[in-house]
Amino acid sequence: MHPDQLEIDKMSDTAPPIHIETRGGASRFNARTRPKYAISRSAFSDGLLYFLAYFCLIRATGMWIGYPPTQDENATVDSGPQQLLLYSLIPFTLLYVWLNSKLVFGYIRRIPLTLAIFMVLVLISTAVSVNFVASARGLMAVVVISLPILLFKNRFGSVKTIDMLRNFAVVAVFANLLYTAILPRYGVMGGSLAGSVRGLFLHKNFFGQFSALAFLLLVPTLTQRPLFTYKNLRIAAACVLALGSAALSKSSTALVLCLVGLASLGVSWLISQVPMKSLRIYVLLVSVTVLAAFVYFFGLAFAGDIASSFGKDITLSGRSELWDALLDALFERPWFGHGFAMFRQPDYIAMFTHQIAWGPRSTHNTYLELALNLGIPAIAMWVIFLLARFVSKAVYVPASPIERMANSREVAVMMMVIIGSFTEAGMMLAPLATWPLLLAVLPETRIKRPLRPKQGAGHSEQPARTRAIQHT
């Protein structure tokens, strides 16, 4: 036996040989010891990414204890803890980017042209803002809250991302209801919104939006076997509680979003049963048309009943007067807007809505808010990108049943956010709960299947194509 081989045998309990060199016909073994409980870089990076994703969702929801019960007192809430949580994400995100720099730069190179143009317009809007410091801080907050979710989705794909969101939704639903039951003084709002449950959230509208999205994510998959497992029963219970939470929040938008989400999930399943892509596009157009007609002839009356039960008008939020007033502000700076995040600041909104008696603190329309902040060209590019991605996902049918269900949930979440943005502000491009959820479903992660060798072609010298996930 070669002397080097004896040395390797003595070290076999620490680590196997790493590589072999051959010099002059003699084999040389280069052994490297490794700690018994070492963690590989990839395992550490994946664990770090899971931590970042959950930490990001906690910050985006803004869940905290001891929020004041009335809406008027919300302005006095100390933002220090939430700011600390937000900026704590930065070093961990930079660490992940440093460990996986090539992978991250690969994601950047695949950014769609439409989205790249939109990003340039956002930077221009921030640069020419009426308050550069406020816009820069708002943009920084959105970037910090966005990166962990985007990195997670591009790294793990749709199935694991949906599973991660469902796990978070289960814990959040139970935590909010337990908090409300134990401390109803803080979990239930008072003042003009007395009786509206808001849990750990700052406002009942935020709680209602999150509950509606959680309900959609937790709708059980009836085709999954075995059906009656502990995990499935836990998810089903959380799903029922999420629907109840949306009702307890007394948010008319949240209840309508639950119906929209279920309808979108059904349409997505129907499309997945159509074999040809051209027919799937046709089914999508017909389904959207039928759904729009139903909403127009029957849904508005139903929505009006929900809104009137909460003391509101048919706009679901009682803000039509506000939107009329803000249109004048839009045409003051139509090209690049007033600056990123400017119309998320109540003081700046009050400059244009002082004549409205009830004193609005937000635009109550995400599209109008983005147009005011970024300008008409930017919101046009964003809507084009959003609709193109929605159609692309809606007509895409993965081969695996698990992937199909994940894709259906993504389509439904997109539809809920798209519809909900008509009556609520801050659902997109804001460090709030709905934005990370939208980012979690926007990127496309499609699996390339191995190419089958042609018959009679013989053996190829090139290695077979492996499965790879294509990210956009």
Image: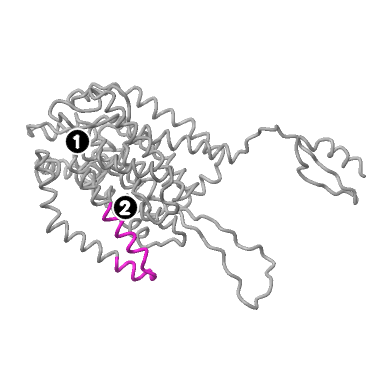
Work out which quarter of the rendered image holds the N terminus and state it.
top right
Q: Is residue 470 above or below residue 318?
A: below
Is residue 210 or residue 42 the one in the foreground? 210
Q: Position of residue 210 (x, y in %)?
A: 29, 39
**What are the residue bounds of the magenta stretch?**
262-283
Where is residue 297? Give x, y as percent: 12, 59
Q: Is residue 234 above or below residue 462?
A: above
* Front residue of 369 and 406: 406
* Image height of 124 relative to 302, above or below: above
Residue at point 67%, 69% (across, down): 460
Model colouring: one colour
Query: Residue 412 shows which numbered tag?
Result: 2
User: In the visual, does 445 lie left or right of 38?
Assistant: left
* Tag 1: amino acid: Ser
Residue density around tag 2, few if under 14, some if 14–19, many if 20 or more, within 10 Å: many
Determine which residue is flagged by label 1. 362
Which of the pair 298/296 is nearer the observer? Answer: 298
**82 in magenta:** no
* Dot 1 and dot 2 residues touching (CB under 8 Å): no
Q: Quadrant of residue 292?
A: bottom left
Q: Earlier in the sequence, mark 1 or mark 2?
A: 1
Q: Is residue 263 magenta?
A: yes
Mark 2 belongs to which amino acid? Ala
Q: How packed is label 1: few (under 14 Cα within 10 Å), some, or many (20 or more)?
A: many
- The residue tagged with tag 2: helix, strand or loop? helix
Apparent side of residue 123 relative to residue 363 in the rendered image (left or right): right
The x and y percentages for residue 316 are: 14, 44
**Helix, strand or loop status at disc 1:** loop
Q: Residue furthest bottom?
A: 456
